[in-house]
Image (spheres, rainbow, N blue to C red):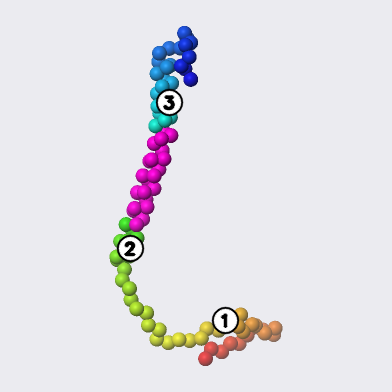
Amino acid sequence: MGFDRNPMRRGSDRIQVILRACLLAAFVLGCPAATGDACHGVYAAGLREGRAEAAAGHRVPAVVLHATFIATAWRHPATPGGPARLSVP
């Protein structure tokens, strides 16, 4: 790490080791905080977008004017001789 008493080690080498340790600590401690802040910003922006979209629309009551039956193949399977002829009332 550079904290031994090696006579060949320069003072700039010791400073470099200290700076590396400080930068590593800042990275390890700062990344979770930065990630949390970014995630909160994205979440808040999504909420704002959803509220703006909901405010722009309006509800309209739906009224069924005419109901018909739907013929489905599982209710009336095809005959072996050809396609099934279904009549819808």
| Few, some or many residues within 10 Å of mark 2 (<14, 14–19, 20+) | few
Which image quarter: residue 34? top left
Q: 44 or 68: nearer the eye?
A: 44
Mark 1 lies on a secondary structure that is loop
Outermost residue, right side:
80
Indicate whether 25 appears above or below 68: above
- Which one is earlier in the sequence, the residue at label 3 or at label 2? 3
Bounds of the magenta segment: 27-47
Indicate the amino acid at tag 2. Glu
Q: Which residue is mark 3?
A: 21
Indicate the amino acid at tag 1. Thr
Q: Which of pointers 1 and 3 indicates the residue nearer the eye?
A: 3
Measured Cα–Cα span from mark 1 to mark 3: 71 Å
Image mark count: 3
Q: Which residue is mark 2?
A: 53
Q: Position of residue 54 (x, y in %)?
A: 32, 65
Indicate whether 41 appears above or below 21: below
Q: Is residue 46 left or right of residue 67?
A: left
Image point 52% across, 83% down: which residue? Answer: 70
Indicate the amino acid at tag 3. Ala
Mark 3 lies on a secondary structure that is helix
Mark 2 lies on a secondary structure that is helix
Image point 31% across, 71% down: which residue? Answer: 58
Outermost residue, top side:
7
Q: Main secondary structure of the magenta part?
A: helix
- Which one is earlier in the sequence, the residue at label 1 or at label 3? 3
Which image quarter: residue 82? bottom right
- Circle on res. 72: 1
